[in-house]
Amino acid sequence: MVGYFYDFINCIIQREKNMSCKVGIPRALLYYKYFPMWKAFLEKLGAEIIVSEDTNQKLILQGASLVVSDTCLPVKVFIGHVLSLSDKCDKILIPVVRSTSEKVYNCSRFLALPDLAKAVVPGVTPILEIEFDYSRGKRYLYRQIYSLGKHFTINPFKIKAAAEYAWETHQRYHKITTEQHLTRVEAIDLLCKGKSIEIKEMGNDGLTIGIAGHPYVLHDEQVSHNLIKRLKAAGVNILTPEMAPETPDSNGNGHTRFAGLAKNYWESEEDVVGAGDWYTRIKVDGIIGIMAFACGPDSMMMSLVQRQAHSANIPFMSLTVEEHTAEAGVVTRIEAFLDMIYRAKRRNQQCV
């Protein structure tokens, strides 16, 4: 009897060893928002994580060649990353985040990402899917988590422990960005890669520029044409949406989402307009809005941010990017925008 028991245990252990695999995660779209959580969950279950390379022009053009021309740039980038992972891993994780709050939904293109990848990427690696949908309740979420975890273990207790660890990691990730004023890329380097990050206090003598935009546009250096690095190199203090506190502080400064505005029905747009509201409340020197060409919700939400900036008498510049955007043009506009703000500040100081 004891022999049968040990044979059974050894069988389970051997099966779980066979279930371990390399899981690819595309460095695009929701990667910037949820990567630490995904990595924590999968590694806890024994998977090896393979992240696609940094975005480059070749990757963008490869992705663009596989989808119809009116597809937005971030999705073209995503498809390029999926293609680049096809021969490097055993499975590719493509979660579907349908909704994380009541009556607020994600872009329809996000909801179709697994199906799109299967349809357009030739010889695509098997895809791991999990759906997050607030409207379907906790029980549905638990079923989705266990369904994903069963690809790596048959032990439900391991899956539960991995899910709890992943959620704790996500909370730490969020806390790092808000409390230490780190960008998402810096927080990922600190939390997931163990890199040391030099935390600089924001100076009072330089400009402070708030940047409004989605993380998959703002933090992708190829897509944004190194916007953050260029601003920092110019001696500018930068603020990004993830740095904003979610509740007002004692001075009334805070990330009051859609303060006084119409109800938001898009999952990702709340951060854009909420950040714009925060920037105007703390009186930054200027706001840069960056968005992808062919994104319908962005064009409307960025217009609201522009109105917020104008009502607070804060300079605003909008940058629209797509795969053919010239870097020289972006650099020229950034330099002109900063020069305009510097001249305005000097003029105001002379008047005083």
Image (cartoon, helix red, strand yellow):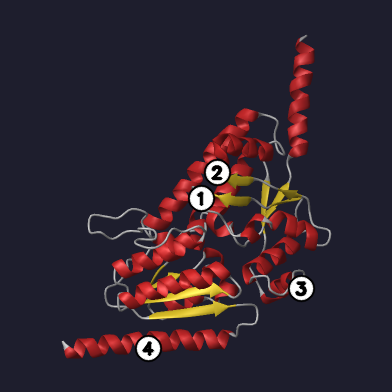
Between marks 2 and 1, how big is the CA–CA gap?
8 Å
Sequence-first tag of 2 and 4: 2
In the picture, the disc for residue 103 is: 1
Sequence-first tag of 3 and 1: 3
Do the residues under discs 2 and 1 have CB atoms within 8 angstroms?
yes
Do the residues under discs 1 and 4 have CB atoms within 8 angstroms?
no
Between marks 4 and 3, how big is the CA–CA gap?
39 Å
Give the number of the mark in front: 3 or 2.
2
Sequence-first tag of 1 and 4: 1
Please say whether residue 220 is visible from this viewpoint: no
Q: Residue furthest right?
A: 123
Q: Residues within 10 Å of mark 4 (few under 14, many from 20)?
A: few
Q: Which residue is mark 4?
A: 339
Sequence-first tag of 2 and 1: 1
Please, what is the three-letter code of the amino acid marked with disc 2?
Answer: Ser
Q: Position of residue 185 (x, y in %)?
A: 51, 62
Give the number of the mark in front: 2 or 4.
2
Do the residues under discs 4 and 3 have CB atoms within 8 angstroms?
no
Please, what is the three-letter code of the amino acid marked with disc 3?
Answer: Ser
Q: On screen, 145 above or below 208?
A: above
